[in-house]
Image (tube, helix red, strand yellow):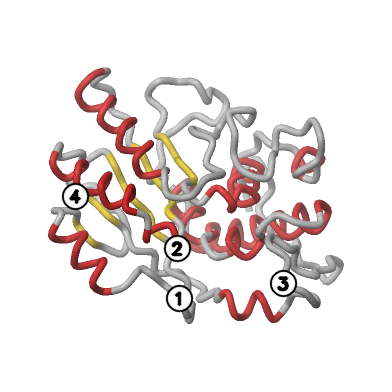
Amino acid sequence: MHGYAYLQALARRIRYDILASTTRAGSGHASSSLSTVELTTALLFGGFFRADPHRPDHPNNDRLIFSKGHAAPLLYSLYAAAGVVSEDELLSLRTFGSRLEGHPTPAFPYAEAATGSLGQGLSVGFGMALNGKYLDRLPYRTFVLLGNSEMAEGSQWEALQLAAHYELGNLVGCPTRPYRCTASPWTSSRAAESRRSSWIMQAFPQERSRKRFIPYFPTEQTTYEDLHRQRGPGTDHGRQILWHPGRGDHQSLPDQEGGG
């Protein structure tokens, strides 16, 4: 498990890589990716997520499903930080023939499911968790990164209720809750509904929990409003942030293999 200072530095590197790859591609939902950097960095590199990045097909690896598939640049940047995606490949985002597609697909070996269509990730995770507990009887856990708006989908809440019914303590839902988002379906009433479905609401996963639903409380309060103010003219879907490197953004960041 890495310390807090290391995780902070690693999160800055991942932010840099998200901006570099989406700037090169000219698109790629940078704001959706940036809004969940701290949560996923702590999850993958803070001692919670158990998997061998060099053996993505190992049956005991924990599963990570990006239900908010438009945050694919974050997924690729996380695995660049893990040392299994090169800088050159990272900059091939959304180019013809690249396995780093605009939304995760099985062409990328660390993508558990193709998640271009929102509202399906928790159902996929439910199936994987059900299989792990009752069929294969393996110790892996399934983590599902959930978008804010897709939590309005009925399929997500059906999966939530079924997971509680089957007592899937190996399933962890991680919803994004962007600050100052004017149309957020993640409300106190929805949190209460999660509790009524027997999911435990808490700020971060703890090993003693059997059934967990984790609202995201970010270390840095990135807001969609702040990110949109950095955009150029126009409101194109998935438009990149106008960003230019060269101010020492990547200084004092951990290298891809770990270290200070």
Q: Residue furthest front?
A: 154
Residue 36 percent coordinates (x, y): 51, 60
Q: Earlier in the sequence, mark 2 or mark 4?
A: 2
- Label of residue 149 in the image: 2
Relative side of 111 to 166, left or right: right
Q: Earlier in the sequence, mark 1 or mark 4?
A: 1
Q: Give SS at disc 2.
A: helix
Residue 233 percent coordinates (x, y): 80, 77
Q: Give SS at disc 4.
A: loop
Residue at x-position 31% and y-position 58%: 214
Mark 1 or 4, which is nearer the eye?
A: 1
- Label of residue 209 in the image: 4
Instruction: Give how far apart the Cα atoms at labels 4 and 3 are.
Output: 42 Å
Tell me the amino acid under the disc marked 1: Ala
Tell me the amino acid under the disc marked 3: Thr
Q: Earlier in the sequence, mark 2 or mark 3?
A: 2
- Label of residue 235 in the image: 3
- Label of residue 257 in the image: none
**Is residue 198 positioned above or below 110 on the image?**
below
Instruction: Give how far apart the Cα atoms at labels 1 and 4 are.
Output: 31 Å
Residue at x-position 64% and y-position 55%: 14
Q: Earlier in the sequence, mark 3 or mark 1?
A: 1
Residue at x-position 72% and y-position 72%: 235
Tell me the amino acid under the disc marked 2: Ser
